[in-house]
Image (spheres, helix red, strand yellow):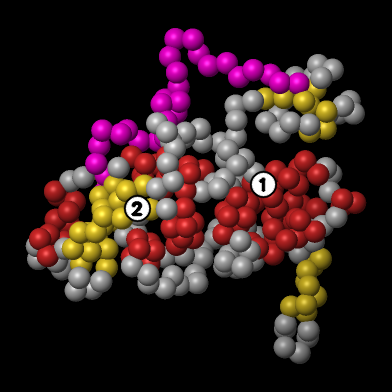
Amino acid sequence: MAATTTISLKLFVDPKSNKILFAEAGKDFVDFLFLFQALPVGTITSLLTKQEMVGCLGNLYDSIENLGDNYVHSKENIYTLLKPMVFHFAANASLSLLPIMQSSRNLYMCNRSCGKYVTNYRNTSCSCGCFRNELVTFVNPKNSAPLYLEGGYVKEAVTYMVTDDLVVRTMSATFIITLLNKFNVKDVGVLEQKVIDVEKDKGLELLRASMQSKAVLTDVFLGKEIPNVLVMASTTVSLELLAYSTNKALLSAEAGKDFVTSKGTYSSW
C-alpha cells in the first residue's frame, strides 16, 4: 500500500451538543491511533515540542540535550533518548501523519567481529574501541512472513468505529445504540455526517489531545479547546531536598545517577 498524506474519516456529530459521538474509520486511521502505543516518550516530546508539553517532560528533554559530554557515558546513548526509533514495522499510509524516525531491521556489529552484540544504531562504540558499522542482514522465516509485514495492525476488509474518547470497535448496530442511549440521542438520523481528510497537522493534534482529553475527536475536529491536563505514571525514590524552613518552598533536590537515569529512561519508552 503506497503511503499517502491524508486519511479519510466520516464523523457523526450530535448538533444539539456539538459533540462527535463517533467516527466511521478504515484500517489506516485505526492503525494510526494504535501507533501511539509504540511511540517512546522522547519521540512524543520532540514531536509536540517542549512548549506544548504539559508538566516537566520538556525540561527533562532539555536537560538531556544540555547536560554536557563530560557527564554522559556516550553520545550514542543520549541520542537514543532524544531521537529514539520506533519499532513498529507498520508500513502503511498512517505513518505519513507523524514525522517519526522509523527503525529499519538493519543490525550492526563491530567490524572486527569481536563479539556477539549487535545494535540498530550504526557507528555506536564497541568495547574494543572500534565502531559497530558492519551490516548484519535481518532474515525472515522462509515459509511465511510475520503478520506485521502485511502492513499495520488491523485488517483492511472491516469498517471500524472510533468514539470521541478513542474507544475502537468494529462497526456494530448494538454499539451505536449503546452510544445513542448514553448521550440521550433518540435517533441516529438526527446526527450530522461530515467526511473529512485527516492531514499531518491534525495527526499531531490527535496525538496531543489523546494525552490531555476525554473528547479527542471533538476537540481536534470541531475546534474545542483541549484542557491542559496530562496524567503520567510516576515512581518514588529517595532524594535529599533543600527547602526554606519558613514556607517549606522547595529550592532543589540532590540526586544521584540512579534517579537521573530513571528519569532519562522515560524518553526511550
For the residues carrying marks 1 and 2, which lies nearer the camera in this image? 2
Magenta segment boundaries in residue numbering: 134-162
Q: Is residue 161 magenta?
A: yes
Disc 1 crowd, CA 10 A, few/some/many (<14, 14-19, 20+): some
- Considering the numbered disc 2 on the image, is that residue within a helix, a strand or a loop? strand
Label 1 amino acid?
Lys
Query: Whole-percent x and y of residue 13?
Result: 23, 64
Q: Return the residue at label 2.
A: 197
From the viewer's side, name the closer residue of 12 and 169: 12
Query: Whole-percent x and y of residue 158?
Result: 25, 37
Label 2 amino acid?
Asp
| Distance CA(mark 1)–CA(mark 2) | 29 Å
**Which quadrant of the structure image shows residue 238?**
bottom right
Q: Is residue 119 magenta?
A: no
User: Is residue 35 visible in the rendered structure shown here?
Assistant: no
User: Is residue 219 visible in the rendered structure shown here?
Assistant: yes
Query: Whole-percent x and y of residue 206?
Result: 43, 57
- Indicate which disc, 1 or 2, sits on the residue closer to the N terminus: 1
Q: Is residue 189 left or right of residue 43?
A: left
Q: Residue furthest top?
A: 143
Q: Is residue 9 left or right of residue 37?
A: left
- The quadrant of the picture occupied by the N terminus is top left
Q: Return the residue at label 1.
A: 83
Q: Residue furthest bottom?
A: 246
- Considering the numbered disc 1 on the image, is that residue within a helix, a strand or a loop? loop
Secondary structure mainly formed by the magenta segment: loop
Residue occupying the point 57% across, 66% down:
52
Label number found at residue 144: none
From the viewer's side, name the closer residue of 177 and 83: 83
